[in-house]
Image (tube, rainbow, N blue to C red):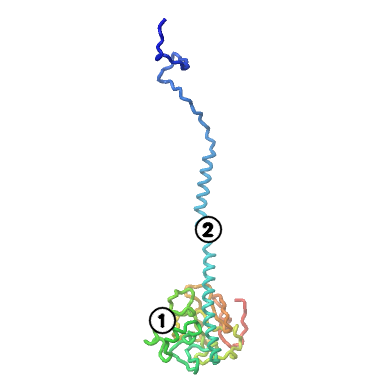
Amino acid sequence: MPVRDDDDYDDRPRRRRYEDEDDDDYDDRPRRRKKKSSGLGTGVIVAGAVVLGLCVIAVPIGIGLLMPAVQKVSEAASRAKEANNLKQTGLGVMNSDATDGRGFYAPYAHDSKTGRLYQGNSFRVSLLPYVERPDVYQRFDLSQPWDGPRNRPAADTPVAAFQSSLDPPETTTTPFRAFVGGGALFNEDGSPVQLTAIADGTSNTIMLVHAAEQVPWAKPQELPYGPGRPLPALGHRNGTGGFNALFADGSVRFLKSPAPEAALRALITRAGGEKVSPDW
């Protein structure tokens, strides 16, 4: 009996071979069972892509819908700031009257002690101490014109109370102008108007209005008024749907454009006796 060598011994279980089986074709690795694709993952991916696409489309649409609301808020804030500036100017006119008791002055500057008029300067120059700019007022020589070499540096100083909120802060012009003459609140020759002369009521009489044409705030150039004269363009040059108006009682109202001419003329005069409809 032949002797078995230990090196030749192999006790692993033997797989039965078949005659037609080639050694090279044999592979005893375990086979992984293939799973059938359910389509759920693909559906999730497609749904996610659709949602993302809708979001990309919705963002600009949402911004477009918000823009009008944002613009309205911005316009309201700007209008409120401008109204505050107008109120400061109106308080200046009233405090000037309270100081010397002579009445409302425009279009010229005046000496609060003597009442003397200085036709080379705007009434706004006299209001500087009352709108928190006494420093600018002290630099003026009322005996010299507003644009003369002595006064021009002061006249080129921005004054917030005379500015529209729609203009840059360095602006040295003003849209806030007074109607003068023709029965308006202010006399064209600059003589003061007593409070008792406003027979239509201070709440029905315009003191200052936002005019489309701006002028240097120190220049005595206001809005000449007369029953036969055409009314000037009012409101900011960029258009805001209306304009702010300061009334003789110190209130500021936003009047829509285009304003009914008859109603506007009634508000310009101080003793015309007209009845003004509140509808506009």
Label 2, secondary structure: give it. helix
- Quadrant assignment, res 99: bottom right
Task: Judge the density around disc 1: few (<14), some (14-19), many (≥20) Cα neighbours within 10 Å.
Answer: some
The circle on residue 81 is none
In front: 49, or 146?
Answer: 146
Amino acid on which the number 1 mark rests in the picture: Asp
The image quadrant where one finds the C terminus is: bottom right
Residue 127 location (% of width, % of height)? 49, 85
Q: Which residue in the structure is indicated by mark 2?
A: 62
The image quadrant where one finds the N terminus is: top left
Left/right of residue 122 with respect to residue 246 in the rendered view: left
Sequence-first tag of 1 and 2: 2
What distance separates the C-alpha of mark 1 from that of mark 2?
45 Å
Left/right of residue 149 with respect to residue 64 in the rendered view: left
Position of 30 relative to 136 (above/below):
above
In front: 255, or 114?
Answer: 114
> Who's the residue at 43% across and 20% down the image?
26
**Residue sticking out furthest to the top:** 1
Residue 240 location (% of width, % of height)? 51, 72
Position of 132 relative to 193 (above/below):
above
Q: Which residue in the structure is indicated by mark 1?
A: 156
- Quadrant assignment, res 152: bottom left
Residue 124 location (% of width, % of height)? 48, 85
Please identify, in this view, whether the residue under mark 1 or under mark 2 is nearer the observer: 1
Amino acid on which the number 2 mark rests in the picture: Gly
Task: Judge the density around disc 2: few (<14), some (14-19), many (≥20) Cα neighbours within 10 Å.
Answer: few
